[in-house]
Amino acid sequence: MPKPVCYSAKAYLTPNATTPLAPATIERRQPLEKDVRIQILFCGVCHSDLHFARNEWGFTPFPCVPGHEIVGRVTEVGGGVTKFKVGDTVGVGCLIDSCRTCPSCRTGLEQYCDKGLEGGTYGGVDKYLGGPTLGGYSQSIVVTEDFVLRMPANLDLASAAPLLCAGITTYSPLRHWKVGPGQKVGIVGLGGLGHMAVKFARAFGAHVVLFTTSPGKVADAKRVGAHEVVVSTDEAQMQAQAGSFDLVLDAVSATHDINAYLNLLKRDGNLVLVGVPPEPMPLAALPLIFRRRSFSGSLIGGLPETQEMLDFCGEHNITCDIEMIRMEQINDAYERMLKSDVKYRFVIDMASLQ
Ligand code: NAP
Ligand code: ZN
Ligand code: ZN
């Protein structure tokens, strides 16, 4: 394929795992037949951005421009675009493409594509320009219309940006395992994902218990919807909850004792991991085998479910609790994220990059 015509855009980029993010100019393709060009207004800051920019998972292709919680305005469309027009407010999450032919893609579970995550918004394979795909810490992005989402008109755009990853990553497993009334659900970690998990589990009608290592977050956890809050470093508080949960969703970004959370489950209960600590975590056999418990994982969500989640948030007025930053504050924001000091998602005001 000949290289398409390109334009340049400002972005924040790192050339390797140890250099802070810094201003750079990148290339984007001019919209092709099915492409939508989006002026990025806000981009959420996911802990995965930090893991990835610092190559903590060991497979980052550089250069790296993170950012996969993108909202913005359509400024140009290709001749074959039917779903969007100039001026629409839209979202882009963790995926900008997939093989579209494997069984997962054909059922709208593009995140589990048999070909892997080549269609990742950043760190994927840019089949038009070569090299890795570059994400949302940027003025604009060009995406094929099938991977662009409609934003509900009633939601504050900045507060809705983190729905594109933190939202769908927690919505999807709670829906998949049919969380609802009569169930007791635990959420581990009140960060970007965790606070959205509390909101969704509550909206789905479950009894919600939030587990935190930060005693200072107890009041906020209740405000965002937890019925109970447990400080997980307090052994007595943990013991009091043993054997009582239908499902526990673990959204912790660092290595921790997962066996403590298996012990919280009832018979046939399920511990779902969405957090991706870089180091392996030892799993004890006995807490699993006793009471026939399950241990599982879940990855973001496919395009149809992401749209469903956004529409659900529009109907129920659900958004994220955000702290707005300017683009040049990103490296400090990463340091604060490492200290669990985010209330509860940083969102970059992309006007600060213009
Ligand atoms: P975050 O905002 O930094 O929140 C992580 C939370 O984990 C912290 O707020 C803290 O909560 C808790 N925590 C941190 N260090 C801990 C430790 N050493 N021990 C126990 N708890 C600790 O991160 P995030 O953006 O929500 O992302 C969470 C994880 O999910 C990351 O690993 C990210 O890469 C991953 N992720 C996965 C998917 C997926 O598809 N599966 C998608 C997006 C992100 P407390 O202060 O309440 O203890
Ligand atoms: Zn993410
Ligand atoms: Zn596929």
Image (spheres, rainbow, N blue to C red):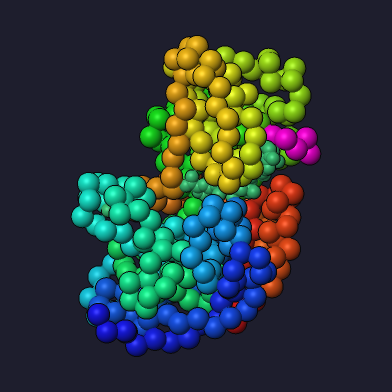
Quadrant of the image containing the N terminus: bottom left
Q: Is residue 289 visible?
A: yes
Q: Is residue 24 above or below residue 116?
A: below
Judging depth in this view, the residue of 336 and 323 nearest the camera is 336
Q: Is 11 colored magenta in this rendering?
A: no
Task: Pinpoint residue 300: horizontal percent, then vertical percent.
Answer: 44, 48
Report which quarter residue 232 is drawn in.
Answer: top right
User: Residue at coordinates 68% horizontally, 15% vertically from top-left?
Assistant: 240
**Relative to 32, is 51 on the left or the right?**
right
Which residue is the extreme one toward the right?
216
Judging depth in this view, the residue of 333 and 197 nearest the camera is 333
Task: Pinpoint residue 164: horizontal percent, then vertical percent.
Answer: 47, 55
User: Residue at coordinates 53% horizontally, 63% vertically from top-left?
Assistant: 67
Q: Is residue 78 above or below residue 51?
A: below
Q: Is residue 46 visible?
A: no
Report which quarter residue 33 is drawn in.
Answer: bottom left
User: Residue at coordinates 61% horizontally, 64% vertically from top-left?
Assistant: 17
Q: How many discs appear?
A: 0
Q: Quadrant of ligand 1?
A: top right
**Relative to 218, is 352 on the left or the right?**
left
Task: Pinpoint residue 101: horizontal percent, then vertical percent.
Answer: 21, 55
**Relative to 316, is 326 on the left or the right?**
right
Question: Magenta region: which residues?
Answer: 212-216
Quadrant of the image containing the C terminus: bottom right
User: Residue at coordinates 34% horizontally, 47% vertically from top-left?
Assistant: 112
